[in-house]
Image: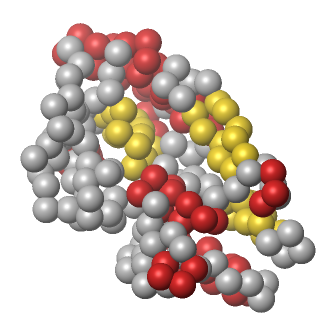
């Protein structure tokens, strides 16, 4: 059963669509049933609600702009990485905006000496495994869908996998985050050292 979430007014939806299109450009803003329906559900058995608009974020500025405009027009936002989860976490339940992060897919750094990887939310977990292994390192969390699920969803859902029994789940491997809040404010949390977290 879907949670009860207040939906935005038709006027707010139209205003946010126009503002997103003008600010981000049409290539990053999807509207209409055909374009938006692939972002309605995840791999759970639940049925979601068709989003009114989908934003394909290509950088952190796109995320901040989207969340600032959503806050201004009082429109709900559903963040989404690969949509491979089975818990409904990436499923749209109130229309509004789906903020898709799959284009934010860079492994920015693998610091072999300090055992740190800096990645964007759209990095496929299997790609992070391969990049770590190429450096002689090991990233333990291994969700069953590791060849398609993304780190952003793994963090949001605290993904595990069979190796979690020995090595723990995703939260044990997150030292810090850069997050953007509703309204567009960006925060940095944590440290680059395990002692500082």
- The residue that appears at 43% across and 78% down in the rendered structure is 161
- Above or below, 153 against 7 in this view is below
- Above or below, 148 against 107 in this view is below
**Residue 46 drawn at (x, y percent):** 13, 55
**Residue 94 drawn at (x, y percent):** 21, 32
- The residue that appears at 23% across and 11% down in the rendered structure is 11
- The residue that appears at 49% across and 25% down in the rendered structure is 182
**Residue 69 drawn at (x, y percent):** 46, 19
> In screen coordinates, is 44 left or right of 77?
left
Looking at the picture, tell me which residue is in the foreground, 190 or 14: 190
- Above or below, 191 against 170 in this view is above
Residue 114: name its quadrant.
bottom right
Residue 33: name its quadrant.
top left
- The residue that appears at 28% across and 29% down in the rendered structure is 96
Looking at the picture, tell me which residue is in the foreground, 19 or 67: 67
Residue 129: name its quadrant.
bottom right
Looking at the picture, tell me which residue is in the foreground, 159 or 78: 159
């Amino acid at each position: 059963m879907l949670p009860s979430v207040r939906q935005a007014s038709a006027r707010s939806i139209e205003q946010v669509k126009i503002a997103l299109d003008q600010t981000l450009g049409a290539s990053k803003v999807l509207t209409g049933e055909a374009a938006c329906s692939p972002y309605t559900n995840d791999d759970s058995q639940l049925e979601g609600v068709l989003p009114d608009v989908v934003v394909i974020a290509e950088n952190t500025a796109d995320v901040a702009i989207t969340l600032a405009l959503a806050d201004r027009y009082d429109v709900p936002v559903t963040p989404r990485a690969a949509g491979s989860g089975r818990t409904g976490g990436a499923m749209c339940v109130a229309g509004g905006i789906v903020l898709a992060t799959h284009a934010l897919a860079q492994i920015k750094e693998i610091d072999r000496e300090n055992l740190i990887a800096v990645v964007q939310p759209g990095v496929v977990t299997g790609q992070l495994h391969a990049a770590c292994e190429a450096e002689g390192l090991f990233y333990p969390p291994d969700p069953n869908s590791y060849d398609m699920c993304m780190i952003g969803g793994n963090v949001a859902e605290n993904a595990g996998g069979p190796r979690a029994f020995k090595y723990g789940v995703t939260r044990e491997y997150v030292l810090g985050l850069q997050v953007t809040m509703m309204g567009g404010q960006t925060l940095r949390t944590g440290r680059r050292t395990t002692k500082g977290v």
